[in-house]
Image (spheres, coloured by chain):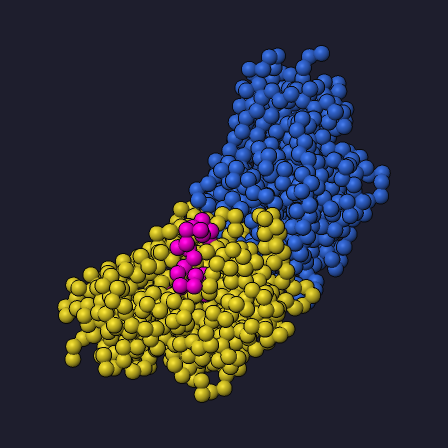
Chain colours: A blue, B yellow
C-alpha cells in the first residue's frame, strides 16, 4: 500500500509548528517551526497593563506558509515522501484566543483604522484584561443560568471568549462595533485554508465553543440573547452572528482551495479538519482513552481525560470544561490545567536571572537536593489558578526562605509547587468518579527535564509514562487530518483507530521513589493548607483576600 | 584646655573597628577596620547545619591590635593628636556571643585538643543551634520562674547565653566539661586588656547578663541553681562560676596593663570600660534619651529606648529585654530588634544574584516604583523574628509574584517588609506606654541608602533623623571610655554629659510623603494579617505551624 501522509499545524503561544506524519505508522517525517515575528516572542504587550497579551494575525498566515513549506522540505529527504501523498490537514491552536473580524470575515487588525489599536488584534489566551467582566459573567450566570457554570467548573474565566469580548465592548466600543463577529484562532485557520472565513460559511469547533464560550446543545448552543442582554444589550447582535451548531475535529471545515494549495505546494481539494485546542489534540496525539490522564506540560499545562458519553458523569467543580466530543466523538472531553508551569521556571531563569544560571545548571543543582531539605514551599499561581480554583486573581507565593536559601532551592520549590498543583487536579478527577488508571505526559518539559518528571511521579505518587512523540499536539492535528481524509483516502475511520496506529509511549516510565513520595505527602498537606488559606473563601481567618487586595492596590497605583 | 581622646572598639559580625574620638567635640580623628580573617567573612560555618555560626577568638585579639594601631596611625595626621592624650577605652561587641574558657580564663579554642571542634570556639549571636534548648528553657521558665521571661519578652531565644550552653552540654559534653565557665565576648575583651580574664577576677557586664542570661538583681543575679538543675544537673557547677554582680558601661573593668599598653602604643593604666552590646553603645553614640527611639539598621536592627527607673514600667511582651542600667545608669534599657534587615538585602544580592544587579542598581530601579504597584508583599523573617514574636523558627515569605515580577520589585518588597517590621516594634513600645517622640537612625543602611530611609519614614509614618556619626557603636564605646576616665582626666562625669558633648544628628530629616504613607497603611494592614497568621498561635485556622513544619522536615531530611 502506498504510504500516505497528513499534516498537523500546531499554533503555540510563541510559534507555529508544522508536522508531516505517516498515517499508518505515526512516523514523523518532516517538521518546521516558525517563531512569530511580532512583539515580544510573538506577543504584543502593553507596559502599563500586565494583564494584556495580544497577537498579530499576519504572524499566523506567514507562519502557516513558512512552517508547511519548511516541513515539506524537511520531509523531502525522507524516502518515499511526496507532497502529492498528503491526504489531509488538521489544526490546533491556543485558546480561548479570539479575534474580531469584519462582515467579510477579515480581521480588524488588517484594517488601516485600527493599525495602532491592540484591541483590534488577537486576544491571546493569557490576556487577563477581562477579569472584572469574568467576575460579572460568573455572578450573572450564578443568578440566572447556573447550568452554564456547572460545565465550566463553576467560574467563568478571564481567559475566555465572553470575558474578552465584553471587556472590549466596555473599554473600546469602536472596535466592538466595527467587529461583525469574533472568531477563535482555531476556527479561523481552517476557514482561511478552505475559503470559508466569510461569517455566512464559517464552521465553528465544539472544542473552543464548548470549553470557553458556554456552548452546549443542551441549551441550544451559545448562551441565549436574553441572558447576554443582561450583561450588555450590544451582545445581542453579536449573538445573532453565532451559529447553533459546532463541529468536532473529526469533521472537515472544507477542502483546500486552489489558491492555498498552490501557496503551500499541496494537493488541491484535500480535506481540512475543524480546529481544536492544542491540548485536546495533544491528548489525542498522546493516545488518550478512558482512564488515561494526559498531561501536556509546557509553559502551562492541560490535564485531559475523556469519559464515555453513555455513562453518567457528575459536574466536577473547578474543571475548566466538560464538553461532549471536544476531544473525540462519543466521549466527553474533560479539561483541567495549570495556568503556568514552564512559565514559572522561565520567569525565574529569564526575569530573575538568579546567579546567571540557566535551566540546565539549576536543574543539575536542584537534582542534588532531597525533598524537604530546603525548607521551602511555593504556590504555583504566578499566572493565577485554572484548576481547581478557576481564579486568575491569585498570585505566586514562596515561604521558608532563610539567609542561606539558594537559587537551586528556589527553582526546585517552584517545580515542586507545580507538581502539587498537578496532584490537586488528579485528585479532583478521582473525587468525582473519573478514575485515573494511567498517566501519559507530553509537552516540552516532559520530554526535556527528567528531574521534573521524577518530582511529579514522587509528588503525585503515580508512575508516569511519556508520550513517544515529542510533538503530540501537531501529531494530534495530523491525526485529525487523517480522520477527515477517511479510510478511502488511506486515512482512518475513527480517532480510536488513529490512536492505535499513530501513537505510543517511550520505554522509560518514571516510578515514585517511596521515601520521596512519603516526604512529599507531608509537604503536600502543607501545600493544601496554603492553597486553601489563600485560595478558598471560607473560614473567618482565611487569607483569601490578601492576594486580591494586593492586586487591587497594584491596579489602583498603576492606573 | 588640652584636647583629650578616648578610643572605642566596636566588634561587629564580620570585622572590628577602632575609633579615636575627641571627648569634648565628638570629632572622630582616626579610625581603622580589621576584617576577621577566619572562615567566611569571619564566620566559621558548617555546611551540614545552617543554624551554626562560630568565630575564632584569635581574630578578636589580632583585630584589637591591628585596628587600634591603625586608628592611631590614622589619628596621627590630625593636628594636635598624641596617643599620650588617650584617657580611656570602651568596648562593644555582638551578643549573645559566649565562648567557653578554662580555669585560667583561656579560651578552649586555643587548646590543641579542640582545634578542630567548632563547639570550643565562640558561639556567635546568629548561631541558632540551640533552638530546641531555647524552647525547653522557655517552657521550664513558664512553669517555674515566669518572672525570668517577663523581662525578656516572654520567650527565651536560641540566640542567647543559656540556649547555647545547654545545647553544647547536650551535643558535646567533652567541650562542656572542659569549660570552667562561659564568657561573653563583650566581657572577655576588656578583661584581656586589663589582666582580669581569670575567672576569679572577671567583671561581667549588666548589658549581656541582663538581656541574654536572665540576670536580674531582683532575683539575686543569674538564674538560681535549683531552676538550672531542672534543665540539667551539670548547669549547677557552671552557675557557681557566675558572680552575683554585674556592671554597666560607665564602670571600669580595670586599667590597661603594661603588656597591652606596649602592644597597643597607649598609656599604661588608663581605665577600660565594662563592655556592652554594640546596639546599646550605638544608642548612646546616637544620643539616646527618654522618648527617643534609636534604630541601628545594619545586617539586623536594634531598636533601643531608655526609660527612667523612677517611673513604673509594664513588662512589654515580645521585647528582647528590659534591663536596669543596660544602656546607661539610672535608666531601664529597653531592647527590641529585627533579626535580619541588611542581611535580607544582602542575601538577595549575593546569594540569589538577580540579573547580576548590585545594591546600587536595584536601589535605583526600586526607587522608581510606587508603593503597592508591584503587588508584592513580604515577611522579613529570613532569620526569624526577634521582636515582637521572639521566634527563630520563622522564615521568610514573599507573596504576589506574577510572571512579570522583576528583581527590583522583589528588592523593594523586601525593603518594605523590614519597614513594616520596624513599625511593629515602634507600635509595641507605644502600646505599652513608652511614647516614641523622636526617632534617630544609625548604622550602615541609614547612612548609605536614602531610598530605604524614605520607605521607612513612609511606612512608619514618622519623621526620621540620622545620627551625625556613621560609627555610633564605636563612638558610644569611646564615650564609655570618656566616662570611666571621668572629668578629672578630661572626660565626662555622666553619659548624659557625654551625649551632650559628643553626639548630634545630620541636617537631613526623612519626612513621610502623605500619599505613600496612606498606601503603606493599606499594605501594613495586610502585612499584619500575614504576620499574625504565620507568627501567632491562636485561631484554629491559623497557619502558625506551616513554617515550623517546613523547618522540622528540613532538619529531619538534613540529619
Closer to the camera in the image, B387 or B154 = B154
> x, y (%) of residue A149?
74, 52
The answer to which image quadrant residue A542 occupies is bottom right
Residue A15 visible in the current orientation: yes
Asked if residue A309 lies left or right of residue B479, the reply is: right
The range drawn in magenta is: B92-118
In the rendered image, the residue lying farthest to the bottom is B310
Asked if residue A26 lies left or right of residue A361, the reply is: right
> x, y (%) of residue A320?
70, 46
> x, y (%) of residue B410?
47, 55
Closer to the camera in the image, B278 or B527 = B278
Q: Is residue A418 above or below residue B52?
A: above
Q: Is residue B114 above or below residue A468?
A: below
In the rendered image, the residue lying farthest to the left is B79
> x, y (%) of residue B460?
46, 71
Q: Is B105 inside the magenta-drawn segment? A: yes
Closer to the camera in the image, B231 or A427 = B231
Q: Quadrant of the N terminus of chain A?
A: top right
Amino acid at each position: 500500500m502506498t504510504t500516505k501522509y497528513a499534516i498537523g499545524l500546531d499554533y503555540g503561544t510563541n510559534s507555529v509548528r508544522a508536522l508531516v506524519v505517516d498515517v499508518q505508522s505515526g512516523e514523523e517525517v518532516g517538521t518546521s517551526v516558525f517563531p512569530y515575528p511580532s512583539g515580544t516572542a510573538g506577543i504584543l504587550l502593553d507596559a502599563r497593563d500586565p494583564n494584556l497579551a495580544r497577537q498579530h494575525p499576519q504572524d499566523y498566515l506567514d507562519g502557516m506558509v513558512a512552517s508547511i513549506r519548511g516541513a515539506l522540505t524537511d520531509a523531502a529527504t525522507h524516502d518515499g515522501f511526496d507532497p502529492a501523498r498528503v491526504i489531509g490537514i488538521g489544526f490546533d491552536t491556543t485558546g480561548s484566543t479570539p479575534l474580531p473580524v469584519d462582515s467579510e470575515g477579515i480581521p480588524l487588525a488588517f484594517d488601516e483604522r485600527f493599525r495602532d489599536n491592540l484591541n483590534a488584534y488577537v486576544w491571546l489566551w493569557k490576556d487577563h484584561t477581562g477579569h472584572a467582566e469574568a467576575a460579572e459573567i460568573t455572578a450573572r450566570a450564578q443568578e440566572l443560568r447556573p447550568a452554564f457554570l456547572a460545565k465550566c467548573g463553576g467560574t467563568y474565566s478571564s481567559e475566555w471568549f465572553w470575558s474578552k469580548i465584553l471587556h472590549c465592548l466596555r473599554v473600546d466600543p469602536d472596535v466592538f462595533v466595527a467587529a461583525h463577529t469574533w472568531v477563535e484562532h482555531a476556527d479561523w485557520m481552517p476557514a482561511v485554508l478552505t475559503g470559508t472565513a466569510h461569517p455566512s460559511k464559517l464552521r465553528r469547533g465544539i472544542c473552543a465553543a464548548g470549553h470557553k464560550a458556554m456552548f452546549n446543545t443542551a441549551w441550544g448552543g451559545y448562551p441565549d440573547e436574553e441572558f447576554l442582554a443582561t450583561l450588555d444589550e450590544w451582545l445581542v447582535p453579536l449573538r445573532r452572528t453565532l451559529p447553533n451548531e459546532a463541529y468536532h475535529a473529526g469533521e472537515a471545515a472544507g477542502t483546500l482551495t486552489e489558491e492555498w494549495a498552490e501557496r503551500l505546494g499541496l494537493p488541491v481539494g484535500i480535506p481540512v479538519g475543524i480546529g481544536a485546542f492544542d491540548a485536546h489534540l495533544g491528548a489525542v496525539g498522546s493516545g488518550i482513552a478512558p482512564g488515561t490522564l494526559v498531561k501536556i506540560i509546557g509553559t502551562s499545562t492541560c490535564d485531559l481525560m475523556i469519559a464515555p458519553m453513555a455513562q453518567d458523569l457528575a459536574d466536577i467543580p473547578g474543571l475548566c470544561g466538560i464538553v461532549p466530543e471536544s476531544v473525540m466523538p462519543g466521549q466527553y472531553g474533560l479539561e483541567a490545567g495549570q495556568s503556568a508551569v514552564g512559565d514559572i521556571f522561565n520567569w525565574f531563569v529569564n526575569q530573575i536571572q538568579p546567579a546567571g544560571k540557566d535551566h540546565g545548571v539549576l536543574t543539575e543543582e536542584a537534582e542534588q537536593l532531597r525533598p524537604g531539605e530546603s525548607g521551602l514551599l511555593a504556590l504555583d499561581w504566578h499566572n493565577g489558578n485554572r484548576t481547581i480554583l478557576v481564579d486568575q486573581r491569585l498570585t505566586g507565593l514562596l515561604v521558608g526562605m532563610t539567609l542561606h536559601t539558594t537559587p537551586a532551592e528556589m527553582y526546585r520549590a517552584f517545580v515542586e509547587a507545580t507538581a502539587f498543583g498537578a496532584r490537586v487536579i488528579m485528585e479532583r478527577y478521582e473525587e468525582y468518579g473519573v478514575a485515573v488508571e494511567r498517566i501519559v505526559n507530553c509537552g516540552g518539559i516532559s520530554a526535556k527535564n527528567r528531574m521534573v518528571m521524577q518530582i511529579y511521579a514522587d509528588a503525585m505518587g503515580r508512575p508516569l509514562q511519556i508520550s513517544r512523540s515529542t510533538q503530540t499536539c501537531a501529531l494530534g492535528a495530523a491525526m485529525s487530518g487523517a480522520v477527515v481524509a477517511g479510510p478511502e483516502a488511506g486515512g482512518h475511520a475513527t480517532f480510536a483507530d488513529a490512536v492505535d496506529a499513530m501513537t505510543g509511549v517511550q520505554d522509560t516510565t518514571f516510578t515514585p521513589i517511596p521515601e520521596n513520595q512519603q516526604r512529599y505527602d507531608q509537604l503536600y498537606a502543607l501545600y493544601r493548607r496554603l492553597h486553601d488559606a489563600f485560595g478558598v473563601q471560607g473560614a473567618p481567618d482565611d487569607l483569601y483576600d490578601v492576594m486580591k487586595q494586593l492586586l487591587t492596590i497594584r491596579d489602583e497605583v498603576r492606573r
